[in-house]
Structures are given as structure tokens and as C-alpha cells.
Amino acid sequence: MPRSKRSKLVSLTKVVKKTKEQKSALMQELQENSEKWRYCWLFEVGSMRNAHLKTVRKLWKDSARIFFGRGAVMAKALGITAEEEHRPGIHKLAKQIKGQVGVLFTDTPPQEVIDWFVDFKQPDFARAGNIASRTVILPVGPVMRHHSDPPEPFPHNEEPQLRKLGLATSLNKGVPTLTNAHELCKKGKPLTGEQAQLLKLIGHRMVAFRVGLIARWDAETGEVEQIEGPGALTPEERIGTVIGEEDEGAMSE
């Protein structure tokens, strides 16, 4: 019997590949920007969030041009060898374009760029796999949401979800309540999906989006300088930028 067309499996995750024309246009745009601006910065991101990267683009739109992703295309456009490089010396930066990194073209003085990115941190909720920056213990009594000041208890209709995520709650006068203290997460331990979801529901931010600078190319000298110290990401930030308990209040302002 012939196979029914109705039983055909259709993938909903198919990604449309970039055409050769689109890649060529991107390469041309990168090369044009390398001729327009004095500096080209290579950067990486800790706790990647598209919304926060869009904020960075918006804040720099009048004084810089940012490209993120498609590393192989960016590297090829700039040239990864001295023979292929589009501008003198830029191959020393292009050959470092690997993984999830981006480039930023600007005329802004280097120290201003470094200072800006050191200060720019956006608190966010951790995801599964991030490392807990502190131990969170939910006390006996109503389960509170910290999205507002002062915190408020969860509504009764969210009690089933809290139980599903691992909290032994019961309704007390219509309020989800704990009869025993519950250790939600432990400092230094990776978060499970349930723990990450609970932290988000309760309002505890444990990570921060931050842009780390890797290297800078100078069109006037053709030299590439590696960035170390405050402008760069730490190893911990690369796997999920962690904010301490003392930083959470200041960063959420």
C-alpha cells in the first residue's frame, strides 16, 4: 500500500539558509565600515539576550556600527591572512573571530568605549545550567513575588504551578503557603530548569548581560591590541554572568 501523504512529517525548525547574495552584501557592508571608521572592536557577550543586544545597538546607533553573528562571513570579509586582509593589520583581529562574537566599528576614543561597556550591565533571570550566585531559601509562610516593592504573595491560581515546580505549598486563606522552609538553589551549583523558572517567577535575578571587549584594531597604525582587565569578560561571565546579592538592588534600578 502506498504511504499516505497525510502521514508525512514536517519539520517546524527548518532554518532558511542565507543566499550567496546576502552573504556578499554583508561582506561588502563590513568592508565599507572598515574604511569608514577608525577603530574596529571585537567583542563577546555574557548571558546573551537579544533584547539587551538591541539596546546596545540603539544606544550606539549614531556613533558606531555593530555586527553580530555569522563569524565565518565576518572573518572572510575582513581577511584572516596578511595577503587577504581588507585593511592593513586587520587580519590580526579577523583571525580571532570564532564562536559567538561581534564587531563594533566606531571613532569613539578607546577609553570611552571601555568605560561605557564596563558600566553597561543589564540584570536578567538565570537559565538552566547557569551557576547560582547565592543560596536562596524560601521561608515558612506565604510564597512572595519580588517583582514589586514591597513584595506581594502569589495569587491562588498559581499554586498548582508552584507545586509542579517542586514547592510543597498549600492554600491558606487563598494564598500559596509553605509550611516548611524550602532551599530553592544552592550557591555554586548549576540551576535546573525548574529552579530557573521558580527564580524568575519569584523575581530573583542572578545573571547580568554584559559585553566583553576582546581586541581593538586601529586604522591609523594597523595595530591590534588585546583587551585585558575591566573591559574583558571573566571566565565565569562567559558561562553566565553572575551578580552577587549585594549587586542585585543596584542593578535593578
Image (cartoon, helix red, strand yellow):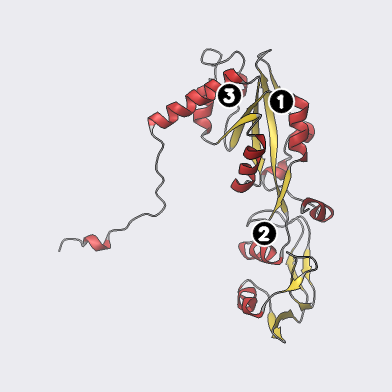
Q: Is residue 183 above or below residue 121?
A: below
Do the numbered discs 3 and 1 sit on residues whose CB atoms are within 8 Å?
no
Q: From the viewer's perspective, is 85 left or right of 150?
A: left
Mark 2 or 3: in front is 3
The residue that disc 2 covers is: 191
Q: Residue at x 73, y 45 (%)?
A: 121
How many C-alpha atoms fall within 10 Å of the one at disc 3: few (<14), some, or many (≥20)?
Answer: many
| Residue kind at label 1, given as amino acid type | Thr
In what element is the residue under mark 2?
A: loop
Which one is in front, 230 or 58? 58
In what element is the residue under mark 1?
A: loop
Q: Residue 12 location, x and y as percent? A: 39, 55
The residue that disc 3 covers is: 94
Structural distance between the alpha carbons of marks 2 and 1: 39 Å
- Marking on residue 108: 1
| Residue kind at label 2, given as amino acid type | Leu
